[in-house]
Amino acid sequence: MRAMSNAATLSAPETPDRLTLDAQDSGLSLGEATYRALCRALREGVFQPGDRLREEEVARRLAVSRTPVREAFGRLQARRLIEPAGGRGLIVRRLELSEALELYALREILEGAAARLAAQHAFPAEIEMMRDHAAAFERAAADPRLMERENRLLHEAIFRAARNRYLDAALRDMQDSLALLGPTTFGVAGRSEPAAREHSAMIEAIAARDAGVAETAARAHMRAALKARLKLIQG
């Protein structure tokens, strides 16, 4: 497979509804770059559970042939992020309740470990970035989708500050699976204000270099997120 060229790189507009190849992936094969673009699209909510994926449409939007799209679809299907839907081609999976519970159990462990390590390794500039995302989250209180975006960026900042490539890889895989849960929990009444306080508790513990408190705060944040998720699932 040929390497991704500048001509194949699409600009990335400042919108959550984007499906583009990333300029940072310019040294990769088109198959790998297409796969990463689709994973980003899942994480960012461009594709939702139940959405149908068409080779020709994705190829057109990414300005690539159908071959790398077919390769990327194969990898997503192997990870059970998408699945066949009878005569309708492929659709984005939706997690069952048991899968959601298992995912949040793992998420609590991984997010707690990331916060603990971030308290040990985060640079001051990274902590300020966490605070910026937390502040943006609060300003977006009327828009659950923007809140979800700032929450995701905050957690990604913590992942990076943890300085552990294996934990980072596990967390990113988990984020792809989280996309299969459907609508954000920040649309649940009464969730946004407690979430903002939970963010503050994590960040301040990281800033204080208190690894134990940071981990405890992150795990509590995940347990609260699970409660909100169950409200959504159970209607």
Image: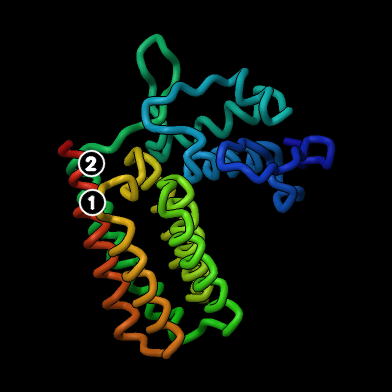
Colour scheme employed for the rendering of this structure: rainbow
Residue pictured at 68% horizontal, 22% vertical: 60
> Front-most of 177 and 149?
149
Dots 2, 1 in contact, CB < 8 A: yes
- The residue identified by callout 1 is 228
Q: Amino acid at mark 2?
A: Leu
**Does residue 72 lie above or below 88 as drawn?**
below
Quarter of the figure with the C terminus = top left
Say what amino acid the circle numbered 1 marks.
Ala
Q: Name the residue at 58% across, 26% down.
A: 70
Task: Identify the image quadrant of residue 85.
Answer: top left
Q: How many marks?
A: 2
> Disc number at residue 133?
none
- Residues packed near mark 2 inside 10 Å, few (<14), some (14 to 19) or many (20 plus): some
Q: Secondary structure at mark 1?
A: helix
Q: Quick one: label 1, few (<14), some, or many (20+) residues within 10 Å?
A: some
Q: CA distance from mark 2 to mark 1?
A: 7 Å
Q: Position of residue 178 (x, y in %)?
A: 37, 47
Side (left or right) of 23 relative to 109: right
Instruction: Please report the residue visible at 46 percent of the width from the left and 85 percent of the height from the top.
Output: 207
**Residue 173 visible somewhere in the drawing:** no
Residue 39 x, y percent position in the rendering: 52, 43
Q: Which residue is label 2 attached to?
A: 232
Relative horizontal placement of residue 97, taking residue 123 as reference (left or right): left
